[in-house]
Image (cartoon, coloured by chain):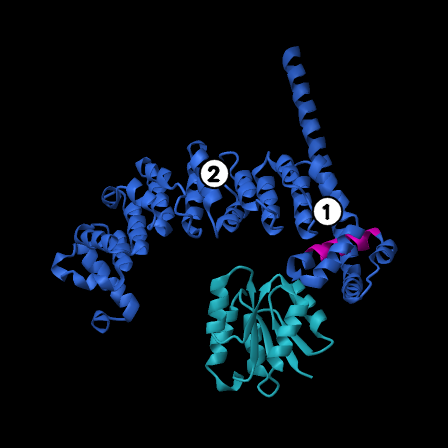
Chain colours: A cyan, B blue
Amino acid sequence: MNSILIADDDKEMRELLRFKLQSGYEVTTVNDGKECWNYLKANPDNLPDLIILDIMMPGLSGYRVLDRMQDSERFDQIQIIMLTSRGKEDDIVRALESGATDYMSKPFSANELIARIKRVLG
Amino acid sequence: MSSASAVSFEILILIASIIIILLALTAVLTIAQSVRCERHDKQNKKVRSSVQEALLERMEAANPDWEEWVEELTTSEQRVATELLEEYLQRIQGRDRAALQKLGCTLGIDEEAQHKLHNGNRFERFWALRWILRLDIDIKIEVLQNTSKDYPETRAAAARVLYEQEQPDAAQAGTELLLQGSEPLSVLGIDTLYQLNKLSPEPLITSAKGSYDNWTESRLIQVLQVIGEAGPSKPDATLGWIGFLFLSESPNVRAAAAQSLSGYGWHEDVRSAVDIEQIRADESPKVRRAVYRMLGTWDDKESTDRLISAIKTEASPRAAIDAIVALEGQVAQVPESDLSTASAAAEDWVLRSKYGNKEAAQ
C-alpha cells in the first residue's frame, strides 16, 4: 500500500483528507511544515511515496519544505501535491517551478484529488 | 447635619446600592453565561468525534439518508453537526459538497437562512448570507439587494454571494451594491470588488466615475487600488475622470490615482487626460514614487525618457530608488555625472541589492 504524508496546519482539512484517503493508502498527518520536515528527517528508511503539502503554514511554509527537500537526493522519489488557495495563480506557478508534481486548489474536490494521486503514484 | 444634606446622603446611599446590585447582577449573569457556554463546549467535545465519524461515513454513502440520521440526533449533536457542516463546506467541493448541502437542508438551515435574511437584524442577515453561500441556495439578485443594502457588512456578504454563485450580471450588481454608501470597504468588500472586476473592470470604472465625489478618501483610495490591480479594460472605458484626482489636495489620493493607471497606459483616454510632466514633478515624493512605478509599467519610449529626465533631478532617495527600479537596466544609458545625488546613491543601492556588487552588474 502506498503511503501518504499530509502536512496542513488546518485540523479539519487534515481530518477530511485522512478520512478520504485512509481506505486506499497508509496515511500519516503532521500539523505544519516544521513537523513535516522533522518527520522526513526522522524516517529516512520509511519515507512517504507522496506528500500533500499545504503552502501557507506557520513556521515553515510548504515552499520552504520543498526547497529543503530539493537540497537532498534522498527525497527525489517523493511525489508532492501542493495545496494552494483558489485563484492564486502565482502560488500555482511557484509550486510547480519549485518541483511540486501537481497542485490542488482549496476548497478541493476529494474525487479529483484521489484521481490526481492515482495518476501521480501510477 | 441639616435635613437637606441628610436627604442627599440617603440618595447617594441609594444610588450606590443600586449600582452595587446592578454590578452583582451583571457578575452573576456573566458567570452563569460562562458556565452555560462551558457546559455546551463540554457536551460538544464529548459528542464531536462520534458525530463527525457518522457524518463523514454518511457523506460517502450512495444514500446518506440524512433525515433518519438527523431525527436521531440530540440538540447538542445537531449543534455539532451544524458546526462540522460549516467547517467542511468551506473546504470541500464536488460530490461530497453536494451531499453535505443536503444535510444542511435536512437540518433546516436553508429555511432558517431565508427567514433571517428577510426578518433578522444585521448579524442574523450576515449569518443567513453565509449559509446561503455555503448551501448554494438559489436567490434572486433583487432579494439580495433589498435585504442587504443598509450595512456595509451585509452588502459585502451579498456581493460575495453574487460572485461565488456566478450569477448573471454579478459584476454589475455586486459592484453597485458594494459601492453604495461612502464609508471605507471591509477586507471582504475589497476582495469581492476585485474578484468581481479582475477580468473586466468596466462595471467598477463606470460606477466609480458616477459616485467617487461622495466617497471618503479611504474609500476612494481603496477603489483606485482595485482599479490598478484589475485586468485590462475595454478601449472605450472612461478613465479620464481619474485625471482630475491629480488635482486633489491629498498626496495619498494623487498617489493612488497614479497607481490605478499603471495598467492602462495604452488608453488614449488616459494619456490625454493626464499631464504626465506635471504629475512627475509633484511636490510629494510619495506621488512621484507612484508615478515612476506607473511609467515603469507603461514601459514605452516616452515613459522611459521621462524616467531618465527624472533621475537627473530627483532629490528624494526613496523616489529615486523607484525611478531606478522602473528603468530596470536602461539607467546605464545615463552618464553617472548626470544623475542627481539621490539617484546615484539609489543606483548603487539597487545594483548592490540585485547583484551583490556594482561591478558584477556592469
- Residue extent of the magenta highlight: B75-86
**Label 1 amino acid?**
Ser
Is there any visible trace of residue B2 in the rendered image?
no
Using the image as rendered, state which of residue A25 and residue B135 is in the foreground: B135
Expressed as whole percent of the image width and height from the top left, the position of residue B234 reads 42, 48
User: Mark 2: which amino acid?
Assistant: Ser
- Which residue lies under the disc numbered 1? B34
Q: Magenta-highlighted stretch: main secondary structure?
A: helix
Question: Which quarter of the figure is the N terminus of chain B placed in?
Answer: top right
User: What label does residue B207 carry, if any?
Assistant: 2
Residue at x 68% of width, y 52% of height:
B134
Residue in view at x 80 percent, y 66 percent: B61
Return the x and y of residue A5 as percentages of the image width and height.
62, 76
Ranked by sequence position, the earlier of labels 2 and 1 is 1
Decide if residue B67 is on the left or right side of residue B361: right
Callout in the foreground (2, 1): 2
Q: Secondary structure at mark 2?
A: helix
| Relative vertical location of residue B302 with respect to residue B253 in this rendering, above or below | below
Viewer-proximal residue among A83 and A29: A83
B280 left or right of B151 in image:
left
